[in-house]
Image: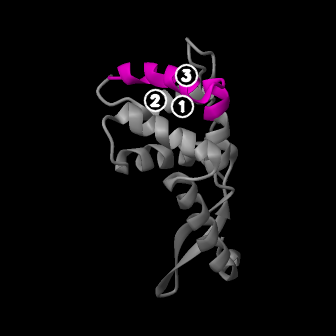
């Protein structure tokens, strides 16, 4: 048994402008070299979709967040993909990472436009980030027989 005790779970701080934890997670993942000036283009979401941009963001993250993931575990001489359930915070981190990866792969003008397009597609239920979630769930379902290796 460990003498150090258990670690505390980190709580993500809320964004000072929007007062939202999810927006703060998103900003921290997007920032590269401190350049977040294109995040102001979230106002484009409100102009194009005529809805609250925070609602579109929450809907997109909720649609992309996975419930289950696979993890490689060496068993004997081979490595099995073992399905594991993941928590909400880790699932949101996966969703943000997938949204950013899908938006970087998109053809387009600049990152702000590509990210805006991917967010709107994810909120509608399409796009590469949604495809990545479905692929992960399919892989976990196919490897369900190895779940006892957890």
Pick the front one: 38 or 142: 38
Which sits earlier in the primary sequence, circle 3 or circle 1? Answer: 1
The type of colouring in the image is one colour
Label 2 belongs to which residue?
28
Magenta stretch: includes residue 10: no
Label 1 belongs to which residue?
25
Secondary structure category for the residue under label 2: helix
Query: Which image quadrant for residue 25?
Result: top right
- Mark 3, Cα crowd under 10 Å, few <14 / some 14-19 / many 20+, is few
Q: What is the span of residues highlighted in magenta in the rendered image?
A: 35-57
Horizontally, is 47 left or right of 55 in the view? left
Judged by depth in the image, the label closer to the viewer, 3 or 1, is 3
Which residue, as the protein is rendered here, is positioned at the far top? 17
Examine the rendered structure and indicate whether residue 131 appears above or below residue 148. above
Horizontally, is 33 left or right of 59 in the view? left
Secondary structure category for the residue under label 3: helix
Q: Which mark is residue 73?
A: none
Pick the front one: 50 or 93: 50
Examine the rendered structure and indicate whether residue 78 appears above or below residue 59. below
- Proximity of marks 2 and 1: CB atoms separated by less than 8 Å: yes
Say if residue 89 shows up in the picture: no
Which sits earlier in the primary sequence, circle 2 or circle 3? Answer: 2
Which quadrant: the C terminus?
bottom right
Name the residue rendered at 64%, 79% in the picture. Answer: 142
């Amino acid at each position: 048994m460990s003498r150090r005790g258990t670690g505390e779970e980190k709580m993500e701080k809320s964004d000072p402008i929007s007062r939202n934890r999810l927006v703060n997670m998103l900003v921290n993942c997007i920032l590269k070299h401190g350049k977040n000036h294109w995040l102001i283009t979230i106002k484009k979401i409100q102009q194009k979709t005529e809805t609250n941009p925070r609602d579109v963001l929450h809907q997109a993250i909720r649609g992309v967040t996975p419930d289950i993931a696979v993890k490689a575990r060496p068993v004997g001489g081979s490595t099995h993909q073992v399905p594991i359930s993941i928590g909400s915070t880790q699932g949101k981190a996966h969703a943000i990472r997938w949204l950013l990866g899908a938006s970087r792969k998109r053809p387009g003008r600049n990152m702000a436009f590509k990210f805006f397009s991917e967010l709107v597609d994810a909120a509608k239920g399409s796009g590469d980030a949604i495809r990545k979630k479905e692929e992960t769930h399919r892989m976990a379902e196919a490897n369900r027989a190895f779940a006892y290796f957890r």
